[in-house]
Image (cartoon, rainbow, N blue to C red):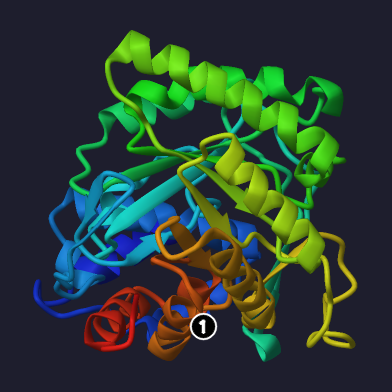
C-alpha cells in the first residue's frame, strides 16, 4: 500500500522535479524500519518502471575514473546491504551512482535473524542492524541480476550461510564465487558482518590465508573457463587494531586480491551510548562509524601503497565526508545509511564534491 502511495505521489509531480525527500522521510520514519526499507525499494522500482527516474534523482555527475580494470562514471557507489537480492539494480543505478553493489547473497536462501532486527538512532544519524544475511539465495539473486539492464559497474557481494560451520566457510564462498562470476563486474567477499556467528573469525591470520588462497585458486579456474578475470575485493570490519590491519594488508597482496572495501559496520557503541536502541545487538552504521573507517583506510593506504584499490565506506552523510574518505586514501566511496537520512540528493552532492576536490588521489 505505502509503496503504491509513494509511486502515486511521484506520478503527480512534474517529470523534471526532484522529490523533496525531507517531505517523504517523516512518513517513512513512522514505519518499522524494515517495512520502510522494503517499501522504499518497491517505490523506487515502480517509479523507474514508469519513467519517473528524474522524480527521485537529479542529473548524474560525470567524473570518470578507471579502477579495477573498470570505468566508473563517478566515484560514488551504493554499498551492499540495501538491495540484498538484486531486485532494484536499475532503479538504484538511476540515482546517479557510479557503481552499485548488491547482496550479501548466500548459496542457499535463509531468513536471517528474528525480527525486529533493524533500528534507527536518528539523534546520531545511525542505524543498528542484525539482519543476518537474509536473502532469497543464489539462484533467485542471479535471476534478478541477469534481468537488470544496468549501465554502471555492478559488484556482487557474497557470504556464507549461517548453518555452514565456520571451518567449512570456504565451501560456501567457492559456491558463491562460481555462481556470480559470469554476471559480476567485481565480486566482494564479506567476512566482516557481525551478524553471522563467528564470521569475523575469517579475518584472523589462521582463517584468512586458506580462505583467500582457495578463492584465488577458484578464480583462476573460472578465469580460464570464462575467458575473463573478475576483480575480487575483501570487505573488512572497522573494529581491527593496527596489527590486524597490517596482517590483512599483507594477505591481500600475497593472495592476489584486487582491492579492499573498508569498512563494514561496527560493534562499538562509542557515540551512541544511552540513546534509544543503542543497546541492541548488531552492527552500527552511519555517522558514528566515520572515524573508525577513516582510521582503517589510512592504515591500509600506508601499508598497501598508492596503487592498491581501496573503496571507503562508513558514515558518509554529506559531500565533505566523501572527500575525507578520498583524502584518507580511498579511491572510491560507497553510501548506505546516509541515504536513509539524506535521501537520493546525497549521491549527487558527494559526486560533485569529489569532482571538485583538487587534492584527491
Seen at 40% across and 84% down, the residue is 323
Query: In the rendered view, does 167 fall on the left or right side of 96?
Result: right
Residue 151 versus residue 178 in the image, above or below: below
Q: Residue under label 1, please give it.
A: 26
Which secondary structure lies at badge 1?
helix
Quarter occupied by the N terminus? bottom left
The image quarter containing residue 126 is: bottom right
In-front residue for pair 51/66: 66
In the displayed structure, does residue 287 sit left or right of residue 161?
Answer: left
Locate residue 276, reporting x and y percent: 83, 82
Q: Where is residue 305 in the image (x, y as percent from the top left)?
A: 49, 63
Query: Above or below — where is 40 with respect to 177?
Result: below
Residue at the farthest top position: 225
The crowding category of the residue bearing disc 1, from other C-alpha atoms within 10 Å (few below 14, some 14 to 19, many at least 20), is few
Residue 14 locus on image (x, y percent)? 10, 77
Quarter the C terminus occupies = bottom left
- Picture residue at 27% right of the left edge, 44% below the top: 69
Amino acid at each position: 500500500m505505502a509503496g503504491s502511495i509513494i509511486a502515486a505521489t511521484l506520478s503527480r509531480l512534474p517529470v523534471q522535479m526532484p522529490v523533496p525527500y525531507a517531505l517523504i522521510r517523516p512518513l517513512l520514519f513512522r514505519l518499522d524500519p524494515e517495512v520502510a526499507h522494503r517499501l522504499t525499494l518497491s517505490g523506487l522500482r515502480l517509479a523507474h518502471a514508469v519513467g519517473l527516474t528524474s522524480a527521485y534523482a537529479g542529473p548524474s555527475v560525470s567524473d570518470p575514473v578507471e579502477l579495477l580494470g573498470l570505468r566508473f562514471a563517478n566515484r560514488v557507489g551504493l554499498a551492499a546491504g540495501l538491495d540484498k537480492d538484486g531486485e532494484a539494480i536499475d532503479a538504484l543505478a538511476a540515482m546517479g551512482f557510479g557503481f552499485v553493489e548488491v547482496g550479501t547473497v548466500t548459496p542457499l536462501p535463509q531468513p536471517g535473524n528474528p525480527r525486529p532486527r533493524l533500528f534507527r538512532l536518528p539523534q546520531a544519524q545511525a542505524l543498528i542492524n542484525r539482519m543476518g544475511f537474509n536473502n532469497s539465495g543464489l539462484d533467485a539473486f542471479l535471476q534478478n541480476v541477469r534481468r537488470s539492464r544496468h549501465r554502471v559497474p555492478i559488484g556482487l557481494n557474497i557470504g556464507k550461510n549461517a548453518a555452514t560451520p565456520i571451518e567449512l566457510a570456504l565451501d560456501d564462498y567457492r559456491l558463491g564465487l562460481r555462481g556470480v562470476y559470469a554476471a559480476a563486474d567485481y565480486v566482494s567477499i564479506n567476512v566482516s558482518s557481525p551478524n553471522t556467528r563467528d564470521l569475523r573469525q575469517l579475518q584472523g591470520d589462521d582463517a584468512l590465508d586458506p580462505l583467500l588462497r582457495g578463492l584465488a585458486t577458484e578464480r583462476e579456474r573460472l578465469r580460464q573457463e570464462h575467458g575473463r578475470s573478475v576483480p575480487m575485493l575483501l570487505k573488512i570490519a572497522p573494529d581491527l587494531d593496527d596489527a590486524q590491519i597490517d596482517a590483512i594488508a599483507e594477505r591481500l597482496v600475497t593472495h592476489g586480491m584486487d582491492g579492499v572495501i573498508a569498512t563494514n559496520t561496527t560493534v562499538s557503541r562509542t557515540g551512541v551510548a544511552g540513546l534509544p536502541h543503542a543497546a541492541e545487538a548488531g552492527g552500527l552504521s552511519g555517522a558514528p562509524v566515520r572515524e573508525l573507517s577513516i582510521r582503517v583506510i589510512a592504515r591500509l593506504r600506508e601499508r598497501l601503497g598508492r596503487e592498491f584499490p581501496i573503496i571507503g565506506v562508513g558514515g558518509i552523510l554529506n559531500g565533505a565526508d566523501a572527500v575525507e574518505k578520498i583524502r584518507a586514501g580511498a579511491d572510491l566511496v560507497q553510501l548506505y545509511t546516509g541515504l536513509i537520512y539524506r535521501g537520493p540528493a546525497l549521491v549527487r552532492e558527494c559526486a560533485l564534491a569529489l569532482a571538485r576536490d583538487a587534492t584527491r588521489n
